[in-house]
Image: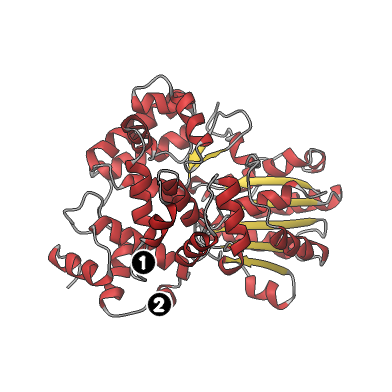
């Protein structure tokens, strides 16, 4: 495999879960946007609201061919972005390849995109182009290419973007021209009926209507919160009493439930989860290399069966990834030296298996931990330092700003503000704003 090779699992539609909750009301909204000829569907919400699952459910039942592309942080380069975009479309509609002239080293990204649009128009095939995890794209040269595609796409192409935050694309113009379908956090929250179906059908729990209602109120229909609750409740003999114990508007239920879930897993499983949590994508041989085990394939399949935040990326049970929030919580238990050693092992494995882009990413993270990269954040005497953005949020908290005000000041979504605050609480080991401010001042992070 050369440095120009593409990772095929990024071009695969995620496997459908047989026990998923059907979301007909949202699928109908997506279908209506397609019927009305909208150019773009945007599914935008914080992590854990079922964005990818919804898109997968709807696209998988579409009469159109579906081109699927899941982004990662390495796609922030125009030529690489276009290569993946074109590969995704050619995989879904092979006739595009015959219409598209071969690339040459002298091709500018804009010229290549024009040729691609012309090929799509000439093929005339109705197509859904799904771009998942678009929030990982931060290069404005790439955003400019996407804006050009949205402005000039043929009528047969419908683009679907899944992201944690609204991308810097001409959404206002599309909205004003009635060319945009939007599904947001408020719509993605489970209804009471969906939550009851999820807890009984997916999680295998028999709860009273009062317990379901209590969980709905305390998780506000957040799907991952309900999943965490379900995992913890599997271990309880008195589920109603357990649910009733979660009281108080200031309590961060997610942190507590995650601790409940992890602490009840056997020590070898917890260790496997910790050591592999640094990986954005994993396979059994890679996990064996990091953990020193020889049974990673069995463990991965067990985790998938247990619905323990493991997402299968293909139908061969070869490549997986963790739910992002799950991985972030696991990171808190890793010391800097342990993370450094794991990133180095991963870099060596990727290099030995001809995956240079992934090797480079792991090597860069290892270099940052080792101090080779410039450190812009102050020394914090924490297991995991706060990022610069988390320090910005912390300073605004100390200034008395509410979540919505912080979001407006930093130009980020409310859900992103909540995610940063959860990370701050976890890293500082606190459970409230007052405690966070006091701890941060004691450490010299803020004045």
Q: Is residue 398 above or below residue 286?
A: below
In the rendered structure, the answer to whether residue 182 lies left or right of residue 195 reads: right
Q: Is residue 120 left or right of residue 324?
A: right
Q: Which residue is mark 2?
A: 409
Percent position of residue 229, x then y: 44, 53
Does dot 1 land on a helix, a strand or a loop?
A: loop
Viewer-closest of 331 and 230 = 230
- Which mark, by number, is residue 155? none
- Tell me if 15 is positioned left or right of 436 in this view: right
Q: Nearer the viewer, mark 1 or mark 2?
A: 1
Q: Secondary structure at mark 2?
A: helix
Which residue occupies the extreme left position in the image? 442
The quarter of the picture where the N terminus appears is top right
1 or 2: tag closer to the N-terminus: 1
Looking at the image, which is closer to me, 103 or 78?
A: 78
| Residue 441: x %, y % from top left | 16, 68
What is the x, y in percent for residue 252?
A: 35, 62
- Image vertical order of residue 353 relative to residue 136, above or below: above
Dot 1, crowdedness within 10 Å: few (<14), some or many (≥20)? Answer: few
Q: What is the x, y in percent for residue 236?
A: 40, 46
1 shown above or below 387: above
Residue 65 seen by the camera: yes
- Does residue 57 appear to the left or right of 393 in the view shown? right
> Badge 1 is on which residue?
247
Distance CA(mark 1)–CA(mark 2): 31 Å
Image quadrant holding the C terminus, namely: bottom left
Is residue 137 or residue 218 the one in the foreground?
A: 218
State whether residue 69 is above or below residue 423.
Answer: above
Residue 145, can we see it? no
Residue drawn 39% across and 55% down?
A: 242
């Amino acid at each position: 495999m050369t440095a120009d090779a593409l990772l095929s699992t990024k071009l695969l539609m995620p496997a459908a879960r047989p026990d998923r909750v059907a979301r007909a009301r949202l699928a109908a909204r997506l279908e209506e946007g397609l019927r009305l000829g909208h150019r773009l569907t945007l599914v935008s919400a914080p992590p854990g609201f079922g964005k990818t699952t919804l898109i997968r459910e709807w696209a998988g039942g579409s009469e159109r061919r579906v081109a699927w592309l899941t982004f990662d942080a390495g796609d922030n380069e125009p030529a690489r972005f276009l290569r993946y975009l074109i590969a995704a479309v050619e995989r879904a509609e092979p006739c595009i390849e015959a219409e598209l002239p071969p690339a040459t080293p002298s091709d500018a990204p804009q010229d290549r995109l024009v040729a691609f649009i012309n090929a799509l128009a000439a093929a005339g095939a109705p197509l859904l182009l799904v771009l998942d995890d678009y929030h990982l794209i931060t290069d404005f040269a790439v955003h400019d290419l996407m804006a050009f595609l949205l402005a000039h796409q043929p009528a047969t192409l419908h683009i679907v973007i899944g992201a944690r935050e609204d991308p810097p694309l001409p959404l206002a113009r599309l909205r004003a021209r009635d060319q945009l379908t939007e599904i947001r956090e408020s719509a993605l929250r489970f209804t009471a009926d969906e939550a009851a179906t999820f807890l009984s059908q997916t999680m295998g729990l028999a709860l009273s209507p009062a317990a379901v209602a209590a969980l709905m109120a305390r998780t506000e229909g957040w799907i991952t919160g309900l999943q965490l609750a379900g995992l913890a409740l599997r271990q309880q003999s008195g589920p109603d009493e357990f649910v009733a114990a979660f009281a108080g508007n200031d309590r961060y239920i997610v942190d507590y439930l995650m601790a409940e879930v992890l602490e009840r897993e056997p020590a070898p499983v917890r260790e496997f989860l910790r050591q592999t949590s640094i990986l954005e994508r994993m396979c059994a041989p890679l996990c064996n290399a990091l953990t020193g085990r020889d049974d990673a394939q069995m463990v991965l399949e067990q985790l998938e069966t247990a619905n323990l935040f493991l997402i299968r990326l293909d139908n061969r049970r070869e490549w997986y990834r963790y739910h992002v929030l799950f991985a972030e919580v696991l990171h808190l238990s890793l010391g800097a030296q342990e993370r450094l050693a794991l990133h180095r092992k991963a870099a060596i494995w990727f290099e030995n298996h001809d995956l240079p882009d992934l090797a480079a990413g792991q090597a860069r993270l290892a270099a940052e931990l080792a101090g080779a990269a410039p450190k812009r954040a102050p020394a914090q005497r924490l297991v995991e330092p706060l990022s610069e953005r988390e320090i910005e949020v912390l300073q605004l908290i100390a200034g008395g700003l509410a979540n919505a005000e912080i979001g407006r000041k930093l130009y980020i979504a409310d859900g992103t503000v909540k995610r940063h605050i959860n990370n701050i609480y976890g890293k500082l080991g606190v459970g409230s704003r007052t405690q966070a401010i006091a701890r941060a001042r004691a450490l010299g992070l803020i004045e």
